[in-house]
Image: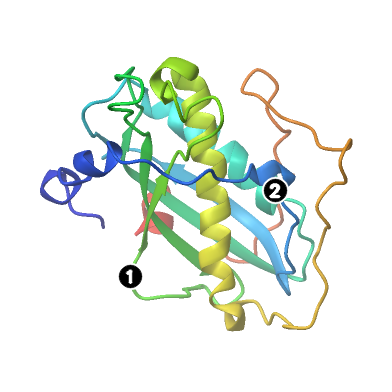
Amino acid sequence: MFPRLPRLAPLAFVIGLGACAAPDPLNDELPNMGNFQLGHNIVVADSMQQIPPSRDASAEDWVAILSSEIDRRFGEYDGDRLYHIGIAIDGYALAPPGIPLVLNPRSILVLSVNVWDDAAGVKLHEEPEQIVVMEGASSETAVIGSGFARNSDEQMQVLARNAARRIQQWMLENPEWFSIDPDAPPFRAAPAVGEITVTTLDDPPPPAEPAASVVPVETEAAAVQ
């Protein structure tokens, strides 16, 4: 599992650096994922640490928003094999207001991710994948900073959306896990201009219907280790 404070502390420096603007995952195309269908979506935050400087956020709120965004990104896939995604939230920082044009702290989210093959009853990799997600800059945050432009709920949603996208990118780096045909078309094209919608925390995407698991995950701890 992800080591505790000694490994997280240096990330406080990274938060002060700028980041490139990240595309909204809700407006991405959905790439082909072969035989993938989402089984269990398990998010835990039992050992989550706050990386200063940061606004406060509860473990319950983090679990809710990240679970929702994982469902939104992966829930549409209808392949013929179930896979479970287990995520431990290791650390976070929600940028407080800084000094415009001088010091603009960025929000960050640190995760440990595991993917399980349901039918085989095995994890597809040896060690949890450590993923570090930055909030990213936008036209509204580039000058005055995220801490002024967004409240903590908005920062959490941006991080959760970016995290779901980054997890998918990592999974696609291992196409053999899902028997992905490299020549297959995208599962879903990006929405055309005018069809793009934005989902907020006040109107979360509906959760995906849970798939019938052949080998149920007995405990949350088993899924994220």
Q: Where's residue 73, x and y in %?
A: 67, 49
Q: Residue at x 81, y 78 (%)?
A: 184
Q: Where's residue 115, x and y in %?
A: 50, 65
Count of numbered circles on the image: 2
Nearest the viewer among 77 and 145 is 145
Q: Where's residue 196, x and y in %?
A: 81, 37
* Horizontal arrangement in the rendering, residue 182 relative to residue 65 (left or right): right
* Horizontal arrangement in the rendering, residue 214 relative to residue 85 (left or right): right
Q: Amino acid at mark 1?
A: Glu
Residue 32 - label: none
**Within 10 Å of the Cα at label 2, are there few (<14), some (14-19), or many (20+) other Cα atoms?**
few
Give the number of the mark in front: 2 or 1. 1
The quarter of the rendered structure image containing the N terminus is bottom left
Nearest the viewer among 164 and 19 is 19
Nearest the viewer among 61 and 152 is 152
- Viewer can see residue 101: yes
Q: Residue at x 25, y 55 (%)?
A: 2
Q: In the figure, 171 relative to 154: above or below?
A: below
Residue position for label 2 = 210
The quarter of the rendered structure image containing the C terminus is bottom left
Q: Where's residue 94, x and y in %?
A: 36, 27
Q: Amino acid at mark 2?
A: Pro
Residue position for label 1 = 127
Q: CA distance from mark 2 to mark 1?
A: 26 Å
